[in-house]
């Protein structure tokens, strides 16, 4: 028996990184998975984003676990695209029990030097995109009087990180959204939580390495310098947190920001 037998999870940013890790962790515990990702590059994002090949790898790994997998190529800034994917998932798999808002980008720059385009794309993807994901799935969850929403915030959402003001502001917003929705949705038996990762070893670190002009290892070391017990966190660690929040093991937890940051927020 898996912890998520019979469940359906809808995961944004699922083509690679923490989204893929969460998808696989939930599939191993019995969930069918709907994956949404943009799988092409965007103006205002200074590194390469996921590809269709990344998505195909995610799907193959889910189906190899004996679970159903759906793929949607969409932009979390576009409500119509998310809503269509949500509706098609419900049509194909019957329901959505778990919504995971992982899609996100990173960037660097002094606050007074950031181009407006980089500010806008950061807030639109990392904060508005989370709200739109919730907005798309909540009528279904409210109607069922059941649901579980998990969003990815960051250590940047509790500390603030210099030279990442747009990223920090977006992640503080994700935590505020989580705590507010937890109160609004409790009467409908919908739990809402978020995860606060430290620096996780994903393609995002590779992208930041490009911006910094260093190799992946140097970027990983510098970006995780605030960690207390490890230099960088594997995506499987945040996936384990997402699985716990998605399961009945955390049935009394809502409105919580679960830090998986190697102690960074303690400093």
Image (cartoon, grey):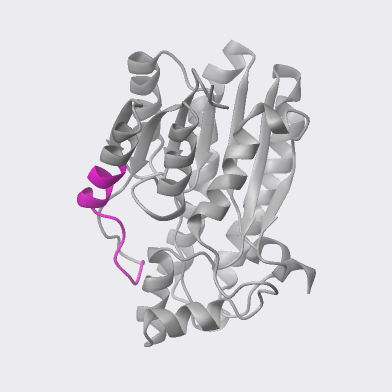
- Whether residue 109 is visible to the viewer of this picture, yes or no, is no
Q: Is residue 197 above or below residue 211?
A: above
Residue 181 part of the magenta-drawn span? no
Q: Position of residue 225 (x, y in %)?
A: 61, 81
Total marks shown come to 0
| Residue 17 placement: quadrant | bottom left
Question: Which residue: 51% across, 43% down?
Answer: 101
Quarter of the image that includes the N terminus? top right
- Whether residue 210 is visible to the viewer of this picture, yes or no, is yes
Q: Position of residue 129 (x, y in %)?
A: 48, 45
Question: Which residue: 50% across, 83% down?
Answer: 113
Q: Is residue 63 above or below residue 208?
A: above
In terms of depth relative to the viewer, which is nearer, 205 or 212? 205
Residue range of the region highlighted in magenta in the rendering: 45-58
In terms of depth relative to the viewer, which is nearer, 4 or 43? 4
Q: Position of residue 87 (x, y in %)?
A: 38, 21
| Left or right for 265, reference 123 | right
Q: Is residue 8 above or below residue 259?
A: above
């Amino acid at each position: 028996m898996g912890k998520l037998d019979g469940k359906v999870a809808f995961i944004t940013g699922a083509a690679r990184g923490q989204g893929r890790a969460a998808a696989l962790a939930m599939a191993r515990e019995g969930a069918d998975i709907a994956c949404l990702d943009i799988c092409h590059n965007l103006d205002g994002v200074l590194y390469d984003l996921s590809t269709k090949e990344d998505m195909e790898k995610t799907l193959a790994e889910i189906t190899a676990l004996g679970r159903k997998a759906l793929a949607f190529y969409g932009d979390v800034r576009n409500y119509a695209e998310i809503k269509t994917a949500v509706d098609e998932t419900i049509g194909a798999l019957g329901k959505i029990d778990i919504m995971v808002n992982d899609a996100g980008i990173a960037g660097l720059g002094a606050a007074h030097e950031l181009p407006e385009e980089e500010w806008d794309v950061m807030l639109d993807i990392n904060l508005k995109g989370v709200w739109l994901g919730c907005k798309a799935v909540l009528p279904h969850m409210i109607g069922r009087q059941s649901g579980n929403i998990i969003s990815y915030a960051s250590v940047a959402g509790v500390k603030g990180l210099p030279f990442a003001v747009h990223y920090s502001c977006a992640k503080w917003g994700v935590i505020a959204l989580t705590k507010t929705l937890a109160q609004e949705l409790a009467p409908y038996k919908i739990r809402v939580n978020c995860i606060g990762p430290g620096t996780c070893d994903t393609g995002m670190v590779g992208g930041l390495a490009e911006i910094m002009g260093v190799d992946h290892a140097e970027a990983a070391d510098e970006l995780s310098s605030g960690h207390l017990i490890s230099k960088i966190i594997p995506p499987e660690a945040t996936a384990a947190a997402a699985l716990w929040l998605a399961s009945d093991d955390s049935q009394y937890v809502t409105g919580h920001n679960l830090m998986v940051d190697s102690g960074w927020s303690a400093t």
